[in-house]
């Protein structure tokens, strides 16, 4: 796969979401969890999405239950939680694995493009990947990086013409 637009993921409602639909946009792909110490980052992610969506940013959440079983609910339960508690309006995909044998292909590709400090594996919930308008990974951010700390990088990526 040459860029993120080559992938498809399942949305929470079970429909297929071709990432080609996001061609020319800046994406922030995040593995999320609803019962994690970093869960309040949903608020910051939603704020970024709202602030920059008209300029071409789309935040995309992928719930994952691999870290401390912190997202045990069904897709419907996770979606309702995100909407009720954080007003999430950005696309949420169906729950996936991000590491291991059953990792979603998009996360295998993301990790190949931008490895971690010690290993390429994702270490915890709310790891973030910023994708440029060309479909390539610009950077990877650790769970502890708050969404608002990525603003300058998002603005720089948005400044690149389509």
Image (cartoon, rainbow, N blue to C red):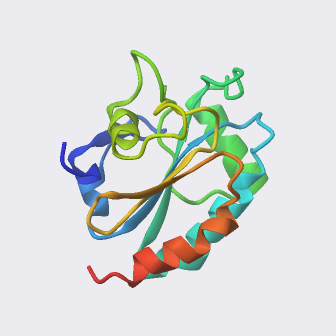
Dividing the picture into quadrants, the one containing residue 80 is: top right
Task: Tell which residue pokes out farthest to the front in this image.
Answer: 118
Up the image or down, 43 lies above or below 77; here it is below
Q: Quadrant of the N terminus?
A: top left
- At a point 28% along the width and 41% down the height, the residue shown is 8
Query: Residue 145 location, x and y as percent?
Result: 68, 55
Up the image or down, 44 lies above or below 113; here it is below
- Tell me if 60 is positioned left or right of 26 in this view: right
Query: Residue 107 location, x and y as percent?
Result: 40, 36
Dividing the picture into quadrants, the one containing residue 9 is: top left
Query: Residue 55 location, x and y as percent?
Result: 44, 81
Nearer to me, 106 or 153: 153
- Tell me if 145 is positioned left or right of 113 in this view: right
Q: Count the marks: how many? A: 0
- Tell me if 152 is positioned left or right of 96 in this view: right
- At a point 50% along the width and 31% down the height, the residue shown is 119
């Amino acid at each position: 796969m040459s860029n993120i637009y080559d992938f498809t993921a399942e949305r929470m409602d079970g429909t297929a979401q071709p990432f080609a639909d996001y061609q020319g946009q800046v994406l922030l792909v995040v593995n999320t969890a609803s019962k994690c110490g970093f869960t309040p980052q949903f608020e910051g992610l939603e704020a970024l999405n709202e602030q920059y969506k008209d300029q071409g940013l789309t935040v995309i959440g992928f719930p994952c239950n691999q870290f401390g079983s912190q997202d045990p609910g069904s897709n419907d339960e996770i979606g309702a939680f995100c909407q009720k508690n954080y007003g999430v309006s950005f696309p949420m995909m169906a729950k996936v694995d991000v590491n291991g044998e059953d990792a979603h292909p998009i996360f295998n590709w993301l990790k190949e493009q931008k490895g971690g400090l010690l290993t390429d594996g994702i270490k915890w919930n709310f790891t973030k990947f910023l994708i440029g308008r060309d479909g390539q990974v610009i950077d990877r951010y650790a769970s502890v990086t708050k969404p608002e700390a990525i603003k300058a990088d998002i603005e720089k990526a948005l400044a690149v013409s389509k």
